[in-house]
Image (cartoon, coloured by chain):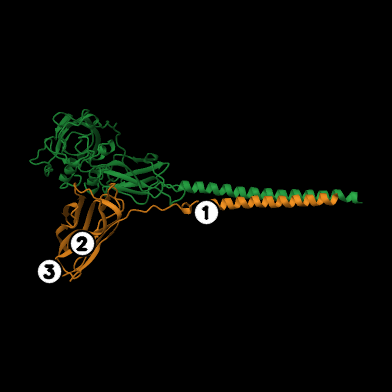
Chain colours: A green, B orange
Amino acid sequence: MAKKKEPVYRIVNLKSLLFTTGIGLLLIVVILAQYVFRTQKQTIVSKADTTPGCNPANVLMAIDPNPSSAGSQINFSVSGTEGDTFIEDSWMPAGGVNCSGTVWGTKTCAGQKEGIYTWEHKWKKCVGSLTNCSSLCTKSLGFTISVRQAPTSTPMPLSTAVPTPTLTLTPSPTPTPTPASVSVKLKLKFQGITTKPKGSQNKLELAIAFKNEKKSIFQTVTKEFSADNNLIWSNADSINLTLSPDNSYLILVKGPKHLQKKICDNYPDESGSGWYTCRNNSYVTLREGENILDFSNIMLFSGDLPQQDGYLNSYDLSLVKNNLGKNDSRSLQIADVNLDGVVDSQDFSLLLSAMSIKADEF
Amino acid sequence: MNFNMNTKMKFISSLLVVVVSAIGFVFLLASKNTQVKSPSPSVTPAIEEKPEGRFWLELTNPETKLAEPINLIVRGDSNKNSITGFDLILSFDQKQMKFVSQKNLNEEFEVFRTVKDDVVNITAIKKLNSNTSTVFDKTPLIELTFQPIKSGKSDFRFEFTPQSKTDSNMINDKSEEILEKVSGLKVEVN
């Protein structure tokens, strides 16, 4: 009998041993899992502890059409791998477009007033949660709104009389006027640039706008200018325009660190630096072929430093004041007004002397 | 022999339970200690302290009479930010008030003023020779003098949109616009 009971005990003990071991192993696995989970969480949290930085290159902005005309729809679109959090958008100067709400994807706005504008998109880069974000990041894009196109008049029917059959004449083709070839070379002078800039400094990208209010024309071109030994800035390549020759143009010139100047004469002159202003009913005449417009007897004033907003204010002044003495490429690009290779008191003085102008002319 | 074997098995299994429990306990303690040692600030990432700039207006004399000019003090607070420049774009009711003059109350700044219609535009920039840090702490900046034209209520309002650089601004030493709040003023002329 005793011999028969022995295996039963052994089986029970073996079961109990296996059960206990199983429970123990399970416990170890649970505790280990908990340990690993906590360690991972700490790693994630410690990663999130560092303030994220944004990269404007990851945000793509597009404006279509550009240039556009007043009264038409303009599409502003944003895409990319960041730029969709804490969005703020502004269009400067105010009054150019009528937009509301936030922009992500594509937003359609109404062009209201002709001019050169800047669209500024602001965002924050957030990692992990909306409380772990970079400071506000900014990217801008310029665009132009031209004068509203005159609506094509649709003849209204005078009566609804049943038409009587008449002889069908083969319509003679209406000759489409081909725009005459108009090209422009400009000669300009900039305030404060007293020596010929060296190397790559001797290059300014200017926005030139041609405005004919009578013909509802507004065309803007961007062209590179360089200085000669007499410090006269001109464009090597002519500006080829799709404009009709006329004697009613206004020309707006804006440099990369400058206030926009409105010019209404083919050969403008001034008795004091910066005194030239357009007289009433005074216009530039553009003729077919090449037009050489010598604006070098008037001074174009600096003041609106990058990123440009059409005004000279404490922001522009601070860019010079806060970069005084610097000659790195970034500082020179934004605040070296006289292009002498260093941001210094001369640049500061040049901005102060433009305080009487303060804003772009239109 | 059978009894001994049984006892031995029971002993071993009990010992195993104790050992496994002990190991588990040690792991648990170890993981808890790690938690305690690691600072918890990171559970919610620290919210970046936002720079805040503020302009507001104060009336020097609370009793305003039609015959007497009124003086407004513009004060500023920059929340520990060092300031390089500022713009004040202040609009007023032309039917009620006429702008007379402005006075710079902070010698560290150079001030430029333009007045067009019902808007006073003041731009101030730190002087070129000033190299010290300037923090606004309820600091009086500009005194503006207006002449009341007729009695009644009159509003003085700062033109301001956050982050926009084309209106009132407070610019720090990194050329960042930090102005976040402005407070205008309503004045009653008797």
Question: Which dot, 3 or 2, sits closer to the camera?
Answer: 2
Q: Residue at x 15, y 47 (%)?
A: A356
Which amino acid does the dot numbered 3 rest on?
Ala
Where does the image place residue A294, in percent across and percent down from the top left? 13, 33
| Residue A160 horizontal side relative to residue A188, left or right | right
Q: In the image, is residue B190 above or below residue A293? A: below
Q: Residue at x 90, y 51 (%)?
A: A2
Where does the image place residue A60, in percent across and percent down from the top left? 38, 40
Where does the image place residue A89, in percent across and percent down from the top left? 34, 48
Which amino acid does the dot numbered 2 rest on?
Ile
> Of label 3 and label 1, which has the lower sequence position?
1
> Of label 1 and label 2, which has the lower sequence position?
1
> Distance from label 3 to label 1 (Cα)?
71 Å
> Distance from label 3 to label 2 (Cα)?
20 Å
Q: The disc numbered 1 marks a residue on which chain?
A: B
Q: In the image, is residue A124 above or below residue A294? A: below
Q: Residue at x 17, y 47 (%)?
A: A355
Query: Could you say which disc has been placed on residue B36 in the image?
Result: 1
Question: Which dot, 1 or 2, sits closer to the camera?
Answer: 1
Residue A225 in which image quadrant: top left
> Distance from label 1 to label 2 (Cα)?
53 Å
* Neighbours of disc 2 within 10 Å: few (<14), some (14-19), many (20+): many
Q: Which residue is mark 3?
A: B67
Contact between marks 1 and 2 (CB within 8 A): the answer is no
Q: Nearer the viewer, residue A163 or A202?
A: A202
Question: Which dot, 3 or 1, sits closer to the camera?
Answer: 1
Secondary structure under tag 2 reads strand
Q: Which residue is mark 2?
A: B73
| Residue A20 horizontal side relative to residue B140, left or right | right
Q: The disc numbered 2 marks a residue on which chain?
A: B
The answer to whether residue A138 of the structure is visible from this angle is: yes
